[in-house]
Amino acid sequence: METGQLTARWARFRGPGTQWGARAAVALLFLPPALLLFTVFVALPMGEAAWYSLFNWNGYGTPTQFTGWRNFRLLFETPAFHTALKNNLLVIVVSLVVQLPLALAMALLLAGRLRGTTGFRLVFFLPYILAEIAAGLIWRFVYDGDYGFIAKIWQAFGAAPPFVLAEPDLAMAAILLVVVWKYFGFHMILYIAGLQQISPTLYEAARIDGAGSWQIFRRITLPLLGPTIRLSVFFAIIGSIQLFDIIMALTRGGPSDSTQTMVTFLYSYGVTRMQIGFGSAVGVVLFVICVVFAFGYKRFLMRDD
C-alpha cells in the first residue's frame, strides 16, 4: 500500500476530535509563556502608567496624593504640549508628502536587476541602519555654527554662518531634513520588494497594447503596490508619532520647546523633572493616540491586506 493511502487512513482513524486535541495541547504548551511575557512587560506597565497618571507623584515611595484628572487638565493647558502635537503632525505631513514619494521614486529607478543598482540601494539604506543617536550627533556637527559643514560653506562666501539648531524658526526644519534622510531608505527597500513581486509579463502585455509609462504606473504599478504603500504609510505615521532619539541628540526639544514632540515632552517634563504622574498622563495620551490610529487604520485601510 502506498504511503499516501496509509496517511489518509491514519488521518480518518484519528478523527477531528483527536486533531483538535493535538492543537489544544500545542496551544496550552506555548500560550502561557507568551501570555506571561505580555502581561509582565506590556499589560502591567500600561496599567501602572494609567494608575500613576491619577496621582501627583515624584517616583519615590508609594503614590498617595490622588489628583484625579488634574494631570490631564494641566497637560492640555501646557503650551509646550500643543507645540509637541503640532510638531508630530508636521513630521507626519512631511513623511507622507516628501519622504514616501521620494522613496517610491528611488524604488522605481532601482527596482530593476541592473548592474550597479545594488550599490545604490545600499548607499540609500545605510542611514536607516545607523543608530538614531549616532545620526543625530553627526547632523548636530553638520549644523554647528562654528565648525560644521554648513558654517564652512557660508564662510567660503564671506557670510556669517547661521546657528541652525539655536534658531526656533530653523531648528524644526533642520530636524525634518534629518528625518527624511534617515528613514526614506527603509521605505525605498519596502517598495523595491513590492515592485519585484509584480510579474514582468503584465508590463510586457501593457506595452504591447500601446500603454505609456504613466498609464502603466497608474493602472498596474500603483494598484498592485497598494498593500506595500499602505504598510509603508502605517510605519511612517507610527514612527513620526514616536519620534524621540534624533531630536534628543540634536536639540533636546529646544530652543524654547520649539522642537518638542510628544515623546520628548514626556521625557523633558515628566522624567527629568521627576513629575512621574504628569509624565504618565502624557504616556496615556500617547498610547491612546497610537492604539486608536493603529486599529482604525487596520480596520478601514488595511482590511483586505
Image (cartoon, grey):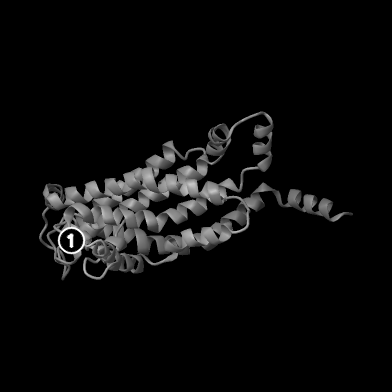
Q: Which residue occupies 28% across, 46% down? A: 90
Q: Is residue 146 above or below residue 51?
A: below
Q: Is residue 265 left or right of residue 245?
A: left
Q: Which residue occupies 79% across, 50% down? A: 9
Q: Which residue occupies 52% across, 49% down? A: 107
Q: Is residue 137 left or right of residue 215?
A: left
Asked if one can make out residue 148 in the rendered structure from this viewpoint, the answer is yes
Front residue (pair 50, 97): 97
The image quadrant where one finds the N terminus is: bottom right
Q: Residue 113 location in percent, x, y? A: 63, 53
Q: Residue 262 location in percent, x, y? A: 24, 54
Front residue (pair 280, 171): 171
Q: Residue furthest top?
A: 209
Q: Which residue is mark 1?
A: 166
Q: Is residue 60 left or right of residue 96?
A: left
Q: Residue 279 location in percent, x, y? A: 19, 59
